[in-house]
Amino acid sequence: MYPVTYFRAQSVAEAVALLGANPEAMPLAGGMTLIPTLKQRLASPSHLVDLMRISALHGIAFESGVLRIGAATSHAVVAESPLVRKVIPALATLASLIGDAQIRHRGTIGGSIANNDPAADYPGAILGLNATIITDRREIPADDFFTGMFSTALAPDEIIVAVQFSQPHRAVYLKHRHPASGYAVVGVFLADTSAGARIALTGAAPCVMRWTAAEARLVAPEDWSSSNFEGLSLESYHLNDDLGATAAYRAHLAGVLLRRAIVQLADVSEPAGH
């Protein structure tokens, strides 16, 4: 193991200061991606800044139609939260499908979206629900946050504090799991929001993406039918093509999952307040 200095930050301000003072430092949350990366010598930070003891990064609250989840909240806590299950059941379902029990108890929502793995689940929810990412210095809309493979709009010393979700009318998340990793070969997050339909795909492309051509077919209430997507296909030229699945297969799978999501959404009642 190469030398590395470990800091356990006690506040967001302290963590930001440590990262700013040490350009080669990296933040550490659940460590589900960072620790394996360090073991493989794919990263060699001078300092690790542990964020998990910062109380301001934990917790779930709901007020005025907005669900706020602290960045250091684990997947297991989100999956098991009665509040999340009541307000946005699809988000709890998504969290329950991440990895295995060990990963769900250690991994965090903030760490997942900051890492922006192409096959991670949470980016689909962030984009599908048009969430807002709250950092130590600004608010970033979902459409502006994910910039490319393992890339986001975050500055090197910027820390995610929380994620805010406006309560949708209805939402569904479906994914085809990779049999070994549990990552999404393709995941579809479909949301019926006050601003219209939003459809996010994860696992399909190098970065989470919206399927805008499919969204355009969901304008009127009567449009929310699987038959409305006949003849619609996802262009495969920009999709991932690897040992897990070909680009053509991913394009076909996205359509299958979307039609299933539409059918399942018909059985989802609107949450209280809508």
Image: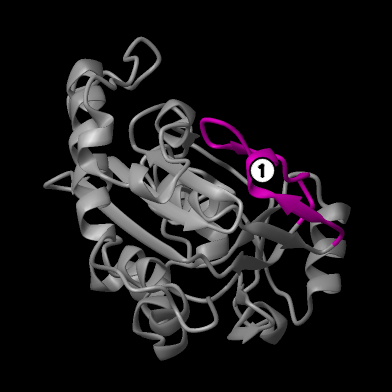
Q: Position of residue 135 (x, y in %)?
A: 76, 61
Residue drawn 27% across the image and 18% down it: 241
Q: How many marks?
A: 1
Residue drawn 38% across the image and 81% down it: 85
Q: Is residue 99 above or below residue 120?
A: below
- Verify whether residue 161 appears in magenta: no
Residue drawn 23% across the image and 19% down it: 231
Task: Look at the image and give the residue range highlighted in magenta.
Answer: 137-158
Q: Which residue is mark 1?
A: 145
- Quick check: 98 left or right of 64? left
Residue drawn 35% across the image and 20% down it: 239
Q: Position of residue 199 (x, y in %)?
A: 43, 42
- Quick check: 179 left or right of 110? left
Query: Dot 1: what SS?
Result: helix
- Verify whether residue 143 appears in magenta: yes
- Viewer-proximal residue among 99 and 20: 99
Around disc 1, counting alpha carbons within 10 Å, would you say few (fewer than 14), some (14 to 19), or many (20 or more)?
Answer: many
| Residue 182 seen in the current view | no
